[in-house]
């Protein structure tokens, strides 16, 4: 009897070989993206643009993604994953090529529009993983994909920064070449998973902007609070990270390659936290206390950055930022999914992704405005206030919903 029970509880996960290809595609996608992202502010400055103008251009990509991601998902259900993979990667490739030739603001805007409107590769990647993975194993596989994503974020910024020493076109063309490798992987090594395609495409406004779902979830206090906390967290984080290049240039007078080292440093610490530390910390402190340490660390990081005197000293507060984001985001995501039924999991994550896109639209514009018209220290100080507010928000929520818990 005991042997039968052990057999039933045994881990029956088998790694699908197609996941190797998907993970390579994700890695190359993120690598190309992270090579280019820290350089765009410096490219804009070299073209004579102001921080606010650069912020507006940066928000173009996120604005396009807000609409493009759900549409790409629907199209992949109808036409298949493989055609949409190829289309989105070609779009990203063209976006990088335009960035390489960007000598005017118009070309820079065009590059971000092209990539933003069709380059929704991650949406198709997540759908493909769902197609080939049993529901009980998806959390594990998405965890693996998150690790691959993190690896791309580690190597990309330093590669882009080093190549930018030649000129800003070289890293853009290098990212385009990496994207071509990703296209080849899809064409030659990735089989289609959607054999029976949908007869017609059904796409409503609510499929793109989930207004009905947002209204429904906001009526449930616990879900509303979780969504609000995640949104406020994203505002604080993206206000800093999407304007980090402009902030570093204004406050520390650094170049693109030095910002690349900063970003790589954040990526290394964050991967270490999420792979080695977080399980031990959660076991010792529990989710709520760990979340408090995360918010507190990010607050300390922003306050220290605001008064950091020089380039080398910035590496220290970035440790606290990497720790804070490394523990906070997984817990906030887990909280979202545990406050809804299993059938609503994908819906609540879709709503959160839309709110995430809204945060990424607002924050580059707000950050560019702050850096242009106020002392640069104002930006990390505002992020510090936002993160500190989350500590009080969380403490009040614990008092309301769990008055007897420590």
Image (cartoon, rainbow, N blue to C red):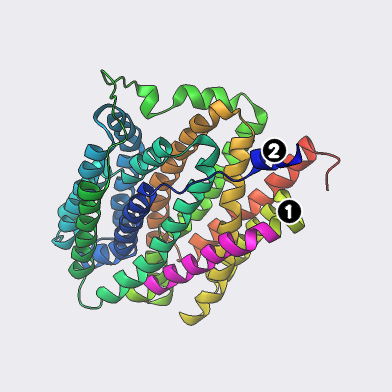
Q: In this view, does 178 lie above or below 113?
A: below
Q: Residues within 10 Å of mark 2 (few under 14, many from 20)?
A: few
Classify residue 48 by image quadrant. bottom left
Q: Residue at x 63, y 44 (%)?
A: 10
The residue lying toward the viewer, choosing from 386 and 406, is 406
Q: Mark 1 points at which residue?
A: 289
Q: Mark 2 points at which residue?
A: 4
The residue lying toward the viewer, choosing from 294 and 89, is 89
SS state under label 1: helix
Can residue 302 be seen from the camera position used here?
Answer: no
Counting every numbered tag in the picture gives: 2
- Please give left or right for residue 301 compared with residue 363 in the image: right
SS state under label 2: helix
Q: Residue at x 39, y 29 (%)?
A: 209
Task: Examine the residues drawn in magenta and state their main secondary structure.
Answer: helix
Classify residue 322 by image quadrant. bottom right
- Please give left or right for residue 100 compared with residue 247 in the image: left
Q: How crowded is mark 1: few (under 14 residues within 10 Å), some or many (20 or more)?
A: some
Part of the protein shown in magenta: 259-280
Residue 275 on the magenta span: yes
- Please give left or right for residue 84 compared with residue 153 in the image: left
The residue lying toward the viewer, choosing from 141 and 180, is 141
On the image, the x and y values in percent for residue 165 come to 25, 78
On the image, the x and y values in percent for residue 290 come to 69, 55
Q: Residue at x 74, y 46 (%)?
A: 395
Q: Distance between the residues labelled 2 and 1?
A: 39 Å
């Amino acid at each position: 009897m005991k042997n039968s029970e052990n057999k039933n509880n045994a881990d029956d996960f088998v790694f699908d070989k197609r996941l190797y290809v998907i993970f390579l595609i994700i890695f190359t996608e993120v690598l190309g993206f992270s090579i280019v992202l820290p350089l765009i502010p410096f490219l804009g400055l070299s073209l004579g643009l102001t921080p606010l103008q650069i912020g507006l251009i940066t928000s173009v990509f996120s604005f396009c993604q807000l609409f493009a991601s759900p549409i790409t998902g629907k199209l992949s259900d109808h036409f298949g994953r493989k055609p949409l993979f190829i289309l989105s990667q070609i779009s990203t490739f063209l976006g990088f090529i335009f960035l390489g030739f960007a000598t005017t603001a118009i070309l820079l805007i065009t590059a971000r529009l092209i990539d933003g409107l069709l380059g929704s590769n991650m949406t198709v990647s997540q759908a493909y993983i769902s197609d080939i993975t049993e529901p009980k194993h998806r959390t594990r596989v998405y965890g693996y994909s998150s690790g691959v994503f993190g690896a791309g974020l580690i190597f990309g910024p330093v590669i882009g920064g080093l190549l930018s020493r030649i000129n800003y076109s070289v890293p853009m063309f290098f990212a385009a070449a990496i994207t071509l490798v990703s296209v080849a992987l899809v064409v030659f090594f990735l089989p289609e998973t959607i054999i029976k395609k949908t007869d017609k495409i059904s796409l409503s406004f609510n499929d793109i902007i989930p207004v009905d779902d947002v209204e429904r979830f906001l009526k449930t206090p616990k879900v509303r609070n979780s969504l609000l906390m995640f949104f406020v967290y994203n505002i604080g984080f993206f206000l800093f990270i999407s304007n980090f290049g402009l902030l570093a240039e204004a406050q520390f007078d650094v170049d693109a390659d030095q910002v690349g080292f900063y970003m790589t440093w954040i990526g290394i610490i964050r991967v270490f936290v999420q792979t080695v530390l977080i399980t031990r910390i959660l076991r010792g402190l529990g989710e709520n206390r760990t979340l408090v340490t995360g918010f507190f660390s990010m607050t300390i990081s922003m306050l220290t950055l605001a008064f950091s005197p020089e380039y080398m000293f910035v590496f220290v507060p970035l440790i606290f930022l990497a720790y804070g984001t490394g523990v906070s985001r997984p817990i906030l995501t887990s909280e979202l999914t545990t406050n809804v039924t299993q059938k609503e999991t994908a819906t609540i994550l879709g709503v959160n992704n839309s709110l995430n896109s809204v945060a990424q639209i607002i924050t580059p514009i707000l950050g560019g405005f702050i850096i242009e018209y106020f002392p640069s220290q104002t930006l990390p100080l505002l992020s510090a206030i936002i993160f500190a507010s989350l500590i009080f928000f969380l403490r009040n929520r614990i008092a309301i919903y769990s008055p007897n818990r420590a």
